[in-house]
Image: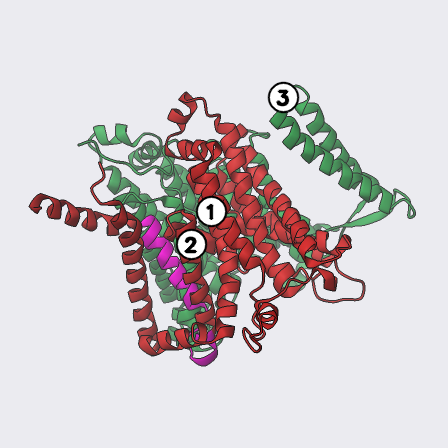
Amino acid sequence: MDVMPKWADVVLVPLISLIIAALLSALLILAIGESPVAALKLMIEGTLLRSSGWGYMLYYTTNFIFTGLAVSVAFHAALFNIGGEGQAMMGGLGVALVCLFIPWPHWTFAIIGASLGAAFFGMIWAGLPAYLQAKRGSHIVITTIMFNFIAAGVLNFFLVGALKPKGSMDPATANFPAATHLPTFEDMAGLLGFEKMFRAAPANVSFFLALVACVLVWFLIWRTPLGYEIRAMGKSEPAARYAGIGSVKIIMVAMMISGALSGMMAINTTQGESERLILNFTEGAGFIGIAVALMGRSHPLGVLLAALLFGFLYQGGAELALWTKIPRELIVVIQALVILFTGALSLMVRGPLERLFLSLRRRG
Amino acid sequence: MDFLTLLQVLDSSLRLATPLLLACLAGLFSERAGIFDIGLEGKMLAAAFLSAAIAATTGSVWLGLLAGIGAALLLSAIHGLASITLRGDQIISGVAINFLAAGLTVVISQDWFGQGGRTPPLLSGGRFEPLSLPGAVPAKEISQAGPFMQLYSELLSGHSLLVYVALLMVPLTWFVLYKTRFGLRLRAVGENPAAVDTAGISVVGLRYAAVGICGVLCGIAGAYMATALQAGFVKDMSAGRGFIALAALIFAKWRPWYALGACLLFGFFFAVDNRFQNILLPAWAMSGVLLALGCGLFAYVRNKTLLDRIVLGGLGLGLAIVATLITLSNLNAGLGSMIKIPVVFIQSLPYVLTVVVLAGFVGKAIPPRSGGVAYVKEK
């Protein structure tokens, strides 16, 4: 059945899709009257050639790893969790409650507590749509979209009400106590004797948490019975049911893991960067998770690479907006093109490739 | 609240419901033909931008409307190519279209007008002006008029042309879907495309037609937002309306007249939210309603499975806790004291109602059977 060798499927298809997206973006930059080559050079200089550029890039990457893994886990069960944004918002609420109301002695304990809080809140916010899908048959895509909007309402309610310190005007919580502040890359580089590295960059220790999450998700999906059941459900629900795998359980578990991962994104942005809970802290990272998961073919290694790419695009896009007249929204266009070509139009890339490999095989 | 205030709120509901209604009917055509479309939001946004941009540069609102429809049709074509011809995932295609519109509108408007992602404000020829129906009393004299005259002048008269177009689209949609051969085939292709194919009718053609109609209606919806409701395009101006239209579509269970009702209801929520900053309710009523809902959930799950008990029971417990908190925090002032309903609650109502309907607690919403599935012709 497999027309293409596995490496072509895993490497070539995303790569070609990316090249098409890049070419179209280059055309757009040309149409605006800027030079795509100069733009790319600027992006690389602002991101890869400066340690603070790396610090920003890895900060964005951390968010995208969490949300990308979240979408991937749901994809493995053939569920489309489009609610990463809302789950991350609720995760932020969890982080804020844990950091503000528990007197943590040291950040090492606080990050464990905040992870649990974020994961728990994200889990609940994904669990409700999962329950509605599993038991009542409501379409998970629609319910998770609705839950995104409801989460924005809930977050707004708490930030203009109960959690806002008295006398403050911004919709944000009080600053978290100093003991919960996470060490940034700048602090860590200082400890190792590299002064002046990653200056003022927001990347922090939660990047390593994201890497651990990659390994754990890989282990869960490919090395545990539960992961096997999730994948079986994703491949064919009737077959899985015939093998005695309960679809209700798998939908619930897969979505709750997915929600927990989305929620944990908030540790990076809330505890790590702003050190208080603010409105709109997710900045669409929940949706970028979709592009990351599609490009990374739902494999943790692929997700890591795609998250690095999007981290690069985000930081590079900020540089472009600063120095040229290309607005930041160009990155949203690139993201849309990546989703379009790796997701919806994948047959357009895959079809010609399959034909190519077929003709090669016949000749060989 | 007097009669005239009520009329004013209803009037503004109608204006705010119009883009929802157009987008909702757009989604109705597409989804009835079996093509899920979560890209309504993006199409409206693209149409809003291009209609405002063309209306601002040419000074003609009609050219703007045409351009808006063109923009939405172009995105529809991408959606059709992805989900009909290439049999890709319709949801993913919709997500991509939303991002494409969100990004491109800002990039292009920044390039064309350089005003931070907005178009120049539209002058009189570039907008759809309110139409005065014959005999309507002007706004200055309305408080002296009788109630029927007030109803006529305030609620029915004084809207832009597109509002009446949107209202007329409802019976038209109903007629096309239920009384014409095309409509019958369109509905059939959403339920059982194989049967339609067997009858020798092109599934692909019908689905493209549906997606095309969807594009035209989204285009009108977007043009209405930028050239009638407001005077120009601003970044992200659709503000989730496409998703509310999707919610209304489910709330209406994919039927045109119910879509009108759902959109008017959601438009009413918007109007109430705009007009009244403080909606007060006695504390006892608020905690009572929440407590009753919580207890209702408890009673409902008593004989259900463990999972039902955990999820719905937990929800009931949450509601009961909120009710208790409200009661406790108002004990000093007495339970008769008035408390403010949070604004976000009104704003979230359309989404909450949609989830409740989707959950099937209040009438089950069953989507077209072949919705979201690409049709593969038998070879």
**Camera-side residue of A236 and B348:** A236
Mark 3 neighbour class, 10 Å CA radius: few under 14, some 14 to 19, many 20 or more: few
Q: Is residue A234 found left or right of B304 in the rendered image?
A: left
The image quadrant of residue A18 is bottom left
**Camera-side residue of B52 and B37:** B37
Alpha carbons under labels 1 and 3: distance apart: 31 Å
Residue stretch rendered in magenta on the structure:
A319-344
The answer to which of marks 2 and 1 sits earlier in the sequence is 1
Pointer 3 and pointer 2: residues touching (CB < 8 Å)? no
Magenta stretch: dominant secondary structure: helix
Callout 2: SS: helix
Please, which chain is the residue tagged with disc 2 on? A
At label 1, the amino acid type is Val
Q: Can residue A126 be seen in this view?
A: yes
Circle on res. B304: 3
Q: Is residue B374 found left or right of B104 in the rendered image?
A: left
Q: Mark 2 points at which residue?
A: A292
Residue ID at (69%, 53%)? A109
At label 2, the amino acid type is Val
Rendering coords of residue B263 (x, y %): 54, 45
Please, which chain is the residue tagged with disc 3 on? B
Q: Does the magenta stretch include residue A323?
A: yes
Q: Can you tell which chain is drawn green?
A: B
Q: Is residue A34 visible?
A: no
Q: Mark 1 points at which residue?
A: A71
Pointer 2 and pointer 1: residues touching (CB < 8 Å)? yes
Of marks 3 and 2, the one in the foreground: 2
Callout 1: SS: helix
* Image quadrant occupied by the N terminus of chain A: top left
Rendering coords of residue A319 (x, y %): 46, 75
Mark 1 neighbour class, 10 Å CA radius: few under 14, some 14 to 19, many 20 or more: many
At label 3, the amino acid type is Lys
